[in-house]
Image: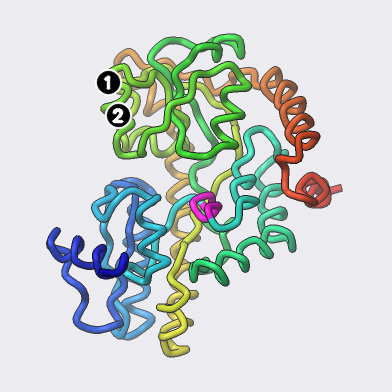
Amino acid sequence: MSMMFRIAGALMAAGLALPAHAETWRLSSMMTPDSFEGQTYQKFADLVDEYSNGDLTIKIYPNEQIGSMDSVVEQLSAGVIQLAPSAVGFMSRWEPGIKFAASPFLFDDYDHWARFIDGDLFQGWLNEVKDEAGISVLGDIPAMPRGSFRTLLTTKPVKTADDFKGLKVRQYQSDLMIDAWTYLGAEVRVLPWGEVYDGINRGIVDAVTAPAESIESMRFYEVAPNIIRTDEYPQAVAFMMSEKAWEKLPEADQQALLRAHKEAAAFGRDLLAKQSATLKADLEAHDGVNVNFEFDTAPLVAKMKDFYAEYDKEGKLPEGLLDAVDAARDK
């Protein structure tokens, strides 16, 4: 039995019956429906229904109901599901260069990062994934930021960069992230996103990096009440998509998807701006929560320059990466 049919059977056994027609697309999400991402995905689904005149329906499965992202991207490649909005780094299994979009403390700001993502080097990597795995990206990646900035939540106070030493930090499976945070002195442990809360609660990890706006929806502050702003790297939501499913759609439905993505991204940015305006006060309203959005990251940035120099010397950086990063700067 092929991998695709085994996955399809598992979906049906879980009550996720295959659609009766090809115009129903499954969207797998890591996030809760009430998070700003969850609300944005629902807006996207509503707009697709409207702009396709009901010809195309988006069925959303939140909270990793269909599986972890590592499993979900395989299902995308097999054509079992059609959409999986998340970090673009999950495509790096087919093109390793993509993981460097989440390089800690490498980019100056969001605009610098966006120009790098839209540049020839990164777009060439995305084309490699499309050719090899049949996964493409719907719309413009930087159009939908994934949080206003990155944070670190810990069970014990972190006052300086030296406090990173020995910290048990949750990360996803990425050699770059594991190496980078190990270089900063942390003890890295890999956990699926949906298991982070329990992992902190049980002492498996005592820290997690997260977009600022996911703190409330995931309730991480309940188990890791010390929160600092790290600006670790810019991040956006990539609408990873089955290229085969896309190619089967009539042009009108393709245009409906693109229009819905563009408008849902704008909707998400508005939600993000509103949440960001009150984020610090909202977090501090919870008993026992300590927030430091003025944390000094300069020692981390300085240390990571040495990390990337060593990585480059060891041949671990993709050819042309540092040149592309430099070229993307607004000079």
The secondary structure making up most of the magenta span is helix
Q: Which residues are magenta?
A: 88-93
Tell which of 204 and 296 is nearer to you: 204
Quadrant (top left/top right/bottom left/bottom right) for the N terminus: bottom left
Residue 214 is left or right of residue 94, and the answer is: left
Location of residue 218 (image quadrant): top left
- Where residue 223 appears, as percent x and y from the top left, is 30, 20
Identify the mark at residue 228; answer none if there is no mark.
none
- Marks 2 and 1: CB-CB under 8 Å? yes
**Residue at position x 30%, y 67% in the image:** 26
According to the picture, the residue beneath numbered tag 1 turns out to be: 201
Q: Residues within 10 Å of mark 2 (few under 14, many from 20)?
A: many
Query: Does residue 275 sit above or below 305 in this rendering?
Result: below
Query: Does residue 34 sit above or below 158 in this rendering?
Result: below
Tell which of 250 and 67 is nearer to you: 67
Query: Does residue 244 sit above or below 218 in this rendering?
Result: below
Residue 130 is left or right of residue 221, and the answer is: right
**Residue at position x 59%, y 42% in the image:** 102
Q: How many marks?
A: 2
Residue 281 is left or right of residue 45, and the answer is: right
* Three-letter residue code for mark 1: Asn
